[in-house]
């Protein structure tokens, strides 16, 4: 006989002590709700130190998951909070989501893939979520990825400004001209953008900026602004200005 609980337990890759114990499909509302529980008496690792501890209490949580055909899917679970001797009461990390996210990791992976191909507003409409929630996910993964960035080999930098939407919402973009990749972008187009670029650039390489960059290319700056920019980057006043 078809066992939908077992099917969804396997589809989600759940392992002991986690399992699905209820599946509800509401055709009128177009949603599928999966309820995950855990084995009674199971102990869980403290998120800080990994020591398995007894459960203190539980917190009701819900996550948006990948659609099941045309049905929106949600996962529900009473997530345990453990009482660690060293760290006190802590909510355990569940295997289907990162802490504090309202989406499962698979749903977040979908968001990141879609975000490469379309504007966030379009993405938010497509998946039926508020764009602020989508931005939070993108911000998290971009920040994680940028922590790993190393700009030690970047020697030629291009600076340009563009306006977002119509009007005067400027964004300054800093590009590695050899690899054709954006290495930094920030709101505004005044001198403070160069300061924040410098700070970020120096945080992603061990060598001070004055010994790393050999050329900076920029357009749309007056000669006076250009000299100030180069001085901020502690560069000789010989870099090119297009
Ligand atoms: Zn602990």
Image: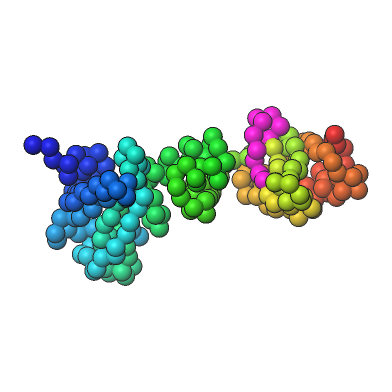
Q: How many marks?
A: 0
Tell which of 158 and 36 is nearer to you: 36
Residue sitting nearer the eye, 147 or 13: 13
Q: 28 above or below 157? A: below
User: From this viewpoint, is residue 125 visible?
Assistant: yes
Give the left or right position of residue 162, taking residue 222 as reference: left
- Viewed as shown, does residue 5 lie left or right of 150? left
Looking at this rendering, what residue extends furthest in the left direction? 1
Our reading of the magenta stretch's main secondary structure is strand
Q: Position of residue 113 (x, y in %)?
A: 47, 37
User: In the image, residue 202 lies at what x, y percent?
Assistant: 66, 48
Residue toward you, 91 or 207: 91
Which residue is located at x 41 percent, y 54 percent? Answer: 101
In the rendered structure, does residue 182 fall within the stretch colored magenta?
yes
Residue at x 65% of width, y 38% of height: 182
Colour scheme in use: rainbow
Residue at left offset 25%, top offset 39%: 11
Q: Nearer the viewer, residue 173 or 72?
A: 72
Residue 188 horizontal/vertical position (percent): 74, 52
- Where does the magenta region start and end? 176-185
On the rendered structure, is 95 left or right of 167?
Answer: left
Residue furthest to the right in view is 223
Left or right: residue 174 versus residue 2 is right
Quarter of the C terminus within the rendering? top right
Confirm whether residue 32 shows in the render: no
Quadrant for the N terminus, please: top left
Q: Residue at x 34, y 39 (%)?
A: 70
Judge whether residue 95 is colored magenta.
no
């Amino acid at each position: 006989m078809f066992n939908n609980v077992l099917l969804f337990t396997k589809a989600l890759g759940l392992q002991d002590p986690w399992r699905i114990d209820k599946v509800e499909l509401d055709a009128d509302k177009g949603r599928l709700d999966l309820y995950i529980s855990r084995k009674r008496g199971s102990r869980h690792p403290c998120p800080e130190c990994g020591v398995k501890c007894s459960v203190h209490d539980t917190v009701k949580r819900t996550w948006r998951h990948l659609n099941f055909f045309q049905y929106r899917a949600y996962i529900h679970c009473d997530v345990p909070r453990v009482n660690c001797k060293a760290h006190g009461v802590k909510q355990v990390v569940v295997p289907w989501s990162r802490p504090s996210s309202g989406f499962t990791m698979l749903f977040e992976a979908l968001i990141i893939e879609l975000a490469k191909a379309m504007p966030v507003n379009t993405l938010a409409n497509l998946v039926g979520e508020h764009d602020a929630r989508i931005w939070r996910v993108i911000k998290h993964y971009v920040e994680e990825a940028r922590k790993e960035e190393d700009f030690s080999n970047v020697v030629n930098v291009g600076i340009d400004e563009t306006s977002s939407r119509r009007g005067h919402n400027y964004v300054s973009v800093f590009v590695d001209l050899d690899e054709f990749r954006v290495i930094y972008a920030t709101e505004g187009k005044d001198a403070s953008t160069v300061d924040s670029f410098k700070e970020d650039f120096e945080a992603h390489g061990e060598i001070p900026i004055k010994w790393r960059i050999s050329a900076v290319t920029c357009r749309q700056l007056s000669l006076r602004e250009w000299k100030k920019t180069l001085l901020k980057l502690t560069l000789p006043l010989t870099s090119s200005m297009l």
